Amino acid sequence: MDCGDQIISDTGTMSVMPSKRYRFALVSVVNDHKKMAMNKDLSGGVGTADDYGGSVATNIVRFIKSKSISLPVISFAYLQSVLKQLGHLVQYFEGEIPAHQSAEFDVVLIYGTIVDYKYENIVAQKIAQQYPKAKVGFFGPFPGVKPELFSNFNFILKGEAEAYFMEQFKELSELEGIVTVHKLTDLDSLPSPDLSGLPVENYGYAPALNARPFATLKSSMGCPYSCSYYCTYGEFQGPKIRQRSAGKVVDDIVNYQKGWGIKGILFRDPVFGLKNQFITEFCDELERRKVKIKWAMETRLDVLSEELIIRMHQLGLRNINIGIETNDPEIAKASKRVLVKEDLQLKMIRFCEKVGVKISAFYIFGLEGDTEKSVNSLVDYAMKLNTHLTRFAISTPYPGTGFYDQVKREGRLLTDDLEKYSQFNLVYKHDGLDPKQVRKLLQRAVRRYYFRPRYMLMNFKWRVRELIELGVEFSIKLYKFPSSRYKKRSSQRSIL
């Protein structure tokens, strides 16, 4: 097949076939030196590193999160599938490529993040020495925004890697310097993600979603809301919603179940279900194909209805992540954030809890206009909502966003060490708060929220509820098993 020819996959999608098959190594760097809850796929793919400080209470929370929440960088699964579809040889490594690895590689792709770019560069340097003939490069939203931090290697992909290898890549010689991706990924053109080599047994999202083995999926990309001023999702994925069809999303789930026994899935969409009718179509497809899966997603409560929540719960929904950020309308306005009305928010949270869907709520300290009083008021509001999980973080001006550009232009950045841009340090000069003050407020909020009787009682009730649900599911399986055996024997007798 000549360069520029096209192939049609078993999903009906079309890709440009390169002139030669290459050997790819995909590397997700793991930094065991940082003792914090680091997840590199979060915050729009630039990564987060949860570090609440050094008190006993916050150390307990940090330890639990680091052991219970571990997400794959889902781009690797899609990228691996794309490359294999094009005929390339692909191996995935989580950590580093072992020194005893005998295979040779033509291309090594490393995922770069804001929270660990220094160590990622160290690992990349080792790999470049280990494979001097290979093209070693970085991909991900952060290397595309800050390529100068990864410039000691062959190439940096500026844009979505899946789109690049599906639409542009033909020759190895193209992988030099900053490689600009000309298109966004058409999600319906992607093959089902391939988890081969990914340690799915290590991934989890407890206690929001306790089902394991666990993995993540994308049903859509893009976010049209104005909070892209400070949020990485809208900035890096664009305002247009790119939706994968409900049928293909369920295909992905079934593929996960057959290939890797996946029982729990977190959808990594910025806002799940924004496209008209997708949730209904998705539920119809799950029901029609009798797919049993426990799943979680992130969305806005004002895009859901009570009827949808009931149906989604019946089809496996067990957790919804919501970004509350602030409850102060003026602070929200300054950050171009559109708030969900408080009465609707409380009503929907209580309804979800009644049905059996957990709510994980996210809050931000140190937004423009914040004061110690407004932060304490926000914590009081969080305690009033009393959601199953709560995450307090610090406002962070990420490179590439309008917020970062404004703060930099005004000379308010306090540090050039971008690894501190982890959502747990105040890295810009704030009118009403200083960095030490915000850290103390953060530690106090964690202690106040998680170490109080009302929360502990609520958490205990959820555990009992989940154990009862597991018991019912197990009983149903026991009932169906002898019944199915009896039917099989009866049919055999009728044949005889």
Image (cartoon, grey):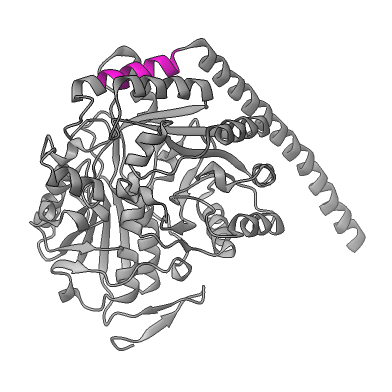
Residue located at (30% from left, 64% from top): 161
Task: Say whether residue 116 is left or right of residue 130.
Answer: right
Of residues 294 and 329, the one drawn nearer to the viewer in this rendering: 329
Q: Residue 469, image x and y in percent?
A: 67, 31
User: Up-down: is 40 above or below 151?
Assistant: above
User: Up-down: is 35 above or below 310?
Assistant: above
- The residue lying furthest to the top in this view is 453
On whether residue 440 falls in the magenta region, the answer is yes
Q: Residue 284, image x and y in percent?
A: 68, 58
Q: Quadrant of residue 20?
A: bottom left
User: Up-down: is 344 above or below 288?
Assistant: above
Q: Quadrant of residue 66?
A: top left
Please identify the dominant SS of the magenta region: helix
Residue located at (52% from left, 27% from top): 387
On whether residue 292 falls in the magenta region, the answer is no
Of residues 56 and 309, the one drawn nearer to the viewer in this rendering: 309
In the rendered view of the protein, which quadrant contains the N terminus?
Answer: bottom left
Of residues 380 and 106, the one drawn nearer to the viewer in this rendering: 380
Task: Say whether residue 53 is left or right of residue 190.
Answer: left
Regarding residue 392, the answer to whether it shows in the image is yes
Q: Which residues are magenta?
A: 439-451
Task: Say whether residue 442 is left or right of residue 14.
Answer: left
